[in-house]
Structures are given as C-alpha cells and as structure tokens.
Image: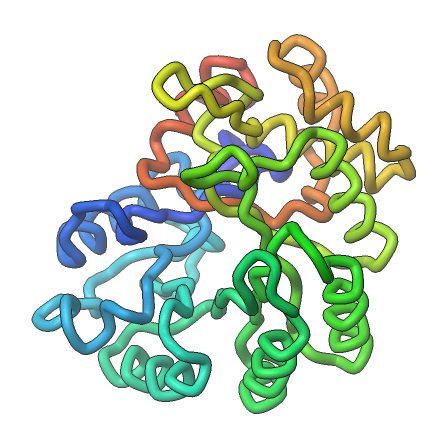
Amino acid sequence: MSTMVPQLYAGLVDDASLVPPSPTAPADAVTKFREHATSWYAALIGTLLLPASLVGTSLSGTSFTGASFTGADSPGTGAAPRLSAGLIGDVPPSALPVTVEKLRAAGLPVAYVEAPVARRGEDPQPGIAMLRSFAAAHPELPVYAEIPLSWGLLAALDTVAAARDAGLAIAPKFRVGGLAAELFPTPVELAAVICACRDRSLPFKLAAGLRHATRHTDPETGFTHHGFLNVLVASVIAAGGGEVAEVAEALAATHPVPLVEPARVHRDVERPLFLGFGAVNVVEPLTELVRLGLINGGYE
C-alpha cells in the first residue's frame, strides 16, 4: 500500500459516479475509475459502485477487461491488475443472482452486494431474510443490508449480528441523508447507531449526504450534513469504548480542529467499524483530506 495514504483511510471512498442521479456514462466511469485506481492515491479508493439496473442495458458495449487495479491493490505490488464492482441492488432480490452472473460473464468481478431491505416505516426483517438467503448461497460475496434508520432498527441489527455469528458475510449499511430533513439523523441518533453496531461487533457502511469532511449546512437546501471525518473519528471513539455522548460530540463538530488530531494519532491503524462511503467524485474527499494535512498530497 502506498505510504501516501495512511492505513486509516484505506478503501474509505467508493466511486459512486454511476449512482443516480449521476449523468456519467458507464464507459466514462470505468475509464475514470481505472485512472483513480492506478494513481498515487489508489489506496484510498474502494470499488466502483454499479447499480444492478444498469446491467444488460446501459452497460452494453462497455469493456471491463482493460488493465486496472482495485482499491485494495496499488501499482508495483505485483498483484494482478483488474477492475471490480460493488453491486447496488436496485432490482428485486430474486434478480441479484442472475445479475452477478451476467457481470462475471462480462469479465467484471463483483466485490460485494449492497441492497435495501425496506422503506422507512416498513418491517426490515423480511428483506433481511432474503439477503441472508442470498449470502448463504453466495458465501464468496460480502452482503450489505441497507436498513432504514427508523422503526425496527435494533431488532434488525440483532438479526444481522446473528447471521454473522452463524458465519455469513453480512453487515449493515445506513443512509444518513437524502431529499428530506427526516433522512438526516441527528448526531445523537447516529451516535446511538454507531454504538449499537459496536456492541454487536458489526462493521457498517454509509450512503448519502457525506460530501465533505466535516459537518456542515448546505446553503441551497438548509439540510445539515454529516462529515465523513466526523464519522471516522466517532467510530474510533466508539471502538475504544466511548459512550453515546462522546461519539455524538465528535459527530457534531463543525470545525476540523477537534477531529484532525485524533485522526493523526490513529493514522497507521486499521479503521474500526466504519467501512466507508460512496462519493460521486472521489477527488473531492481526497482534496479535503490533503487540505487538512491528513494525506500528504502525492509527495513522499
């Protein structure tokens, strides 16, 4: 792994350039991902997120077989160059196995599958049961169950934890933003979720709203977004045994000063709990980490 990207940030940012409402064409997204995955900051990049609804339609004619590195590899490591994708299950769960096989046949390995289990207010248990069956049938594929931050959450986490204890590669994913104010959890609410995952030994992924390093208010919508650096530091605190109030304090910080030092102290350790998030333009979080002095900007 490049020493220019500390271990704390390894694979932190998935490439969400194909996730709606992005206008990026698949061929352009693949080309750009290859550029990211062979750059000096390659270790920061996770996978290319690919909506399942694009498979067999918009992907027609897109080549996946050119030389490229996944975010887990970097130039010069001797690893076989290849492209892989995180499949976003925006199709019925019954269609996921066929979609995975179509991608494999096209020469694109699938690194993992993410899929929603319910809408807000719906019981997440039936959806988790379907994903659990998928995970059991595809033990080589990690599965991320997108659970709404609403009714039934804690029971859903118990179910996911039980499935992991049974040997299935399944973990939760949460949306922390969207087109309505209620889709943005407060720092205390998100802190409680992070601590609940900690207590159940559940790593988690996040989606939506994490555009910047620190907590901020969008001037156009008035919505206050969580910062990905806030979440990272909050996860470190939670993993160290921090209470909900301590974790919430890190999530509520709107200035980078209280976040930068904890991030520097833990720069050479594996990131706990928080597996990562998707960004439409992965250069944006990279630029903010460089500006904060947490990644050295391509210079040894």
| Residue drawn at the location 63% of the way across and 75% of the way down | 128
Q: Quadrant of residue 267?
A: top right
Q: Position of residue 269 (x, y in %)?
A: 72, 39
Q: Position of residue 62 (x, y in %)?
A: 13, 66
Q: Quadrant of residue 103?
A: bottom left
Residue toward you, 26 or 121: 121
* Position of 116 relative to 204 (above/below): below
Q: Quadrant of residue 106?
A: bottom left
Q: Position of residue 259 (x, y in %)?
A: 68, 18
| Residue drawn at the location 73% of the way across and 66% of the way down | 156
Residue toward you, 261 or 243: 243
Residue toward you, 281 or 290: 281
* Position of 29 relative to 133 (above/below): above
| Residue drawn at the location 75% of the way across and 44% of the way down | 194
Q: Position of residue 281 (x, y in %)?
A: 32, 36
| Residue drawn at the location 81% of the way across and 75% of the way down | 162
